[in-house]
Image (tube, rainbow, N blue to C red):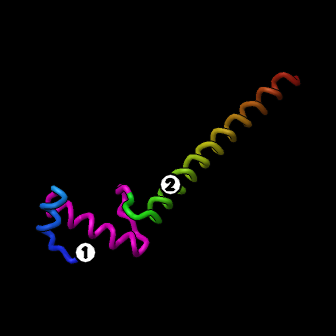
Amino acid sequence: GGMSVPDVCKQQDVGPTALRRWIDQVRKEREGQTPVGAKAITPDQQRIQELEAQLRQKDRDIEILKKASALLLLDSKDYSR
């Protein structure tokens, strides 16, 4: 809002390095990029991170189900003999 970096730092009680990092991150997020390992700042990027996490969980669930199905199939073949 037209304030200088030192003024914002003083008002928010943060260091200039942290503030500049946040500014850079917001600019990148507005371009659709979130730094790896960073927690998103903008709502759009936060939603993308949530959806990516859900997708990773679903992939893990699918792998577990595949392994369980294979075990059950082997077990049923043993009992049919």
Q: Which residues are magenta?
A: 14-39
Q: Which residue is mark 1?
A: 1
Residue 37 rendering spot, x and y as whole percentages:
36, 55
Q: Residue at x 12, y 61 (%)?
A: 10
Relative placement, left or right, of 36 versus 8 is: right
Q: Residue at x 35, y 63 (%)?
A: 35
37 vs 33: above or below? above
Foreground: 57 or 14?
14
Residue 50, disc: 2
Relative placement, left or right, of 35 versus 16 is: right
Question: What type is the residue that disc 2 sits on?
Answer: Glu
Name the element at disc 2.
helix
Question: What type is the residue that disc 1 sits on?
Answer: Gly
Question: Residue 38 in magenta?
Answer: yes
Foreground: 73 or 51?
51
* In the image, farthest residue toward the right: 80
11 vs 59: above or below? below
Relative placement, left or right, of 40 versus 50 is: left
